[in-house]
Amino acid sequence: MELTSTVFTAKAIYVGVIFAITLGVAAYSTYFERIFAAFFQDRVGPDRAGPFGILQPLADAVKMFMKEDFIPANSSKWLFILGPCLSMFTALMTSAVIPFGDTIDLGNGVKFDLQGIDVNIGILWVFGIVSLGVYGILVGGWASNNKYSLLGAIRAASQNISYELAMGLSIISILMMTGSLSTKAIVEAQQNGHWNILYQPVGFILFIICAFAECNRTPFDLPECETELIGGYHTEYSSMKLGFYLFAEYINMFVSGAVMATLYFGGYDYPFYETVVNSFGENVANLIGFGALIGKALFFVFVFMWVRWTLPRFRYDQLMNLGWTGLIPIAMFNVVWTGLIILLPAEFNLSSWASIGVAIAGIPVLIVGLFIYHSIAGGKKKKTALAR
Amino acid sequence: MNYQPSDYLPIIVQIGAALAFIVLTMVATHWLGPKRHSKAKDDVFECGIESVGNARTPISVKYFLVAILFVLFDVEIIFMYPWAVNFKTLGWDGFLEMIVFMSLLLAGFIYVLKKGVLDWEK
């Protein structure tokens, strides 16, 4: 697409809209998290600020802003300020490559992509920016000069980098299916119901587990494990600096929901697209697609909250064992199996249903493999226990 | 589709908006909140017990091992990205070659596990 001044202005407006949506969704996620928590625990939840407590996020924001901006005496002052800013910055930058919708016709033959930047490194951008997110937490925790903060920060760092490996491996199988790193190309390959979730059920489960760990959400919220570490890496933080850390977490939830929708659930694809195009025109249909992607992302935000009030927290060694000895070998198996999913049907000229069949056949193979592995490894452990 | 360096230009808008939001919020919260200092308050909070010494003491070497292993394996995973993008053109040959690469990677991985690097209970 030629980058004319019209398109640039449109992009600027678009970036503003996406910012407003991400911040609004993040703010209201805090409200809905509390509403869902109340529902799951059979109590009322926030109901004072406005009807049904709908103004609660505004009240929270005002409170955060009016609190004292506290900096401990023996901390590294500038790093202490930089920490939450980095967290927030990385959270806000990830959404740039997500294709929130197809093209919109602006008139005069100008087609406008509903995507911040469509670049050929697409998914690597997400991956790179998410990796930078570790620095926000590590810098903040280290600068606080507090033993608990430092422990929380180190935990967060080693947890995030461990789960990044499995995440990177699970994305590889998507790239094999599509043959491109561009997020737009990945979405376009999934149009008309050919969603990657059908071909990559194991990859999706790996990805969502890693997304939970990367966002530091329960059951992987050990960096802010209250019972052991007071508040974890944000123990010393107050006012909007604390707000930034919490806010960044909610933005990350929404963005990772959008990434999951892009990679596995067809992005802005939705059923009956052709019918809508025929009766209302392409622009309306693509705007509904925009809504469909946001809806999918919000569903994943709900899953994040649902899991939070369902599963208890891991122990730290369990967390690291799951990441290294559990997810990485499974992700490697998934890459090899994806090779079979692509090559076998192509070899015998079979339809995409055969690919789905091979993909589903992968699940029992994986389960049997894990069972055999555990009966061998588990048997060994029992023997050594007896020998002692 | 042709990709050009100018594709990256709109990211400047997003960087600008993000930085503006962050700086404005930081300045506003610094300016709005009260400032009351006292010696006890400015200390770090460690469950109300008087904090002893500097927090920047040596920490368990396990964390460093994890970091180094991450660098190793992450580089190997990045090696796979170009292969994955060209997977369909490489066909069965590329698939078998990658199985050799992955079994070498897996051998290294099993060595690391057997060495007990990730044994957190010790």
Image (cartoon, rainbow, N blue to C red):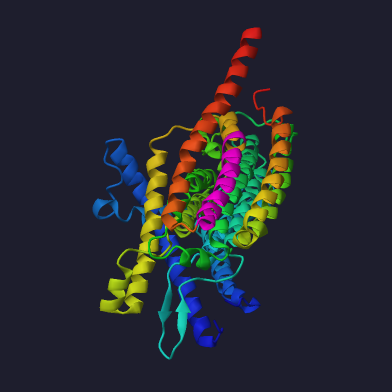
Which residue is situated farthest in the front direction here? A348
Q: Main secondary structure of the magenta part?
A: helix
Which residue is situated farthest in the top direction here? A387
Q: Please state the extent of the stretch shown in magenta in the rendering.
A: A325-348
The residue sitting at 47% across, 40% down in the picture is A363
Nearest the viewer among A363 and A215 is A363
Residue B54 within the magenta-colored segment of the rendering: no
Horizontal and vertical percent position of residue B79 = 70, 54
The answer to whether residue A289 is left or right of residue A155 is left
Residue A334 within the magenta-colored segment of the rendering: yes
Which residue is situated farthest in the bottom direction here? A108
The answer to whether residue A263 is left or right of residue B43 is left
- Residue A28 visible: no
Horizontal and vertical percent position of residue B11 = 58, 71
Horizontal and vertical percent position of residue A214 = 55, 47
Nearest the viewer among A12 and A196 is A196
Horizontal and vertical percent position of residue A144 = 64, 44
The residue sitting at 60% across, 40% down in the picture is A328
Q: Relative to A278, does residue B41 appear above or below in the rendering? A: above
Nearest the viewer among A194 and A270 is A194
Q: Relative to A312, does residue B92 appear above or below in the rendering? A: below
Q: Relative to A50, does residue B46 appear above or below in the rendering? A: above
The answer to whether residue A345 is left or right of residue A56 is right
Q: Quadrant of the N terminus of chain B?
A: bottom right
The residue sitting at 66% across, 8% down in the picture is A387
- Residue A55 visible: yes
Q: Quadrant of the C terminus of chain B?
A: top right
Q: How many marks?
A: 0
